[in-house]
Amino acid sequence: MVDVNQENGINNVGFLELTGKSPEDLSGISYLENVGVILVPESLHATLMKIPQKNVGLIVTVPITKGKIKVLSGQLTLSGDVFSNLTGSPEDILVIVGQVIISSPIEAVGFSEVIVAGQLFAPKSQESKIASTVSRMVGQIAYYTGDVPRIFIGDETFSQDFFELIDSKMSLILIGSCEISEDVDIAILKQKIADFIIIGDITVSRKLAPLIQILATTKLGDILIREDEDQAG
């Protein structure tokens, strides 16, 4: 947790949570720089905006509530049961920050609001439920169709051996810069992969590019042809 009770600035922080803080807590912050996401209660928004800021990504304002604010952050895989809030109050607010996979159906929603900042990935069958559940979204929602979703963040290379080890149809969620090796053939992708969700760039052979285009249900980035193949052509 970042200490906000300091007479200096806060910098190089992925996620800064200010719920539960007071105006006095923020008075010692001289500047904010290189902060990915700031979560701030509505009562502190004006105070926050008076602080000099540089390279601040998202500011997510949480409304005033008599209930609790539950924050989940990071790279998470969550069951749909997390939305039921069985041990909480209907006035509670759920805030999800980061990259989150919902792995099972949402049966009930026990929060007054559900706020998402980042990327949310859910089963295609839950599209209408997600639309009615999420009250505010800052980022992207994408839906997968495979039995098994897997998320990879950063630089990853996937070989023929990787795909051969997959037991059931998989949805591959790729965030960053990824590559599919030259040894991977069309047949194995058709057999093992239900769909791709691509947020970033993916480098593939020329022969695989059309299939990746078909399997990519969400593409926020580029499908790149391997450089040596372009030179050869």
Image (cartoon, rainbow, N blue to C red):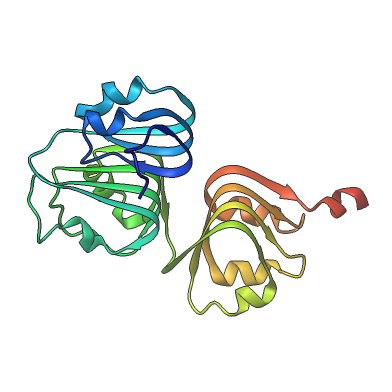
Residue 67, percent from left and from top: 9, 44
Q: Is residue 3 above or below residue 188?
A: above
Total marks in image: 0
Q: Is residue 233 visible?
A: no
Q: Is residue 157 above or below residue 216?
A: below
Residue 4, percent from left and from top: 34, 39
- The reply, left or right, for residue 52 in relation to residue 72 is right
Residue furthest to the right in view is 232
Q: Is residue 38 visible?
A: yes
Q: Nearer the viewer, residue 5 or 118?
A: 5
The residue positioned 20% from the left and 41% from the top of the image is 20
Q: Quadrant of residue 16?
A: top left
Q: Nearer the viewer, residue 185 or 153?
A: 153
The residue positioned 42% from the left and 60% from the top of the image is 145
Q: Nearer the viewer, residue 92 or 123?
A: 92
Q: Is residue 230 above or below residue 79?
A: above
The residue positioned 91% from the left and 49% from the top of the image is 231
- The reply, left or right, for residue 21 in relation to residue 16 is left
- The reply, left or right, for residue 218 in relation to residue 93 is right
Residue 166, percent from left and from top: 54, 77
Q: Nearer the viewer, residue 57 or 194?
A: 57
Residue 101, percent from left and from top: 38, 58
- The reply, left or right, for residue 90 in relation to residue 197 is left
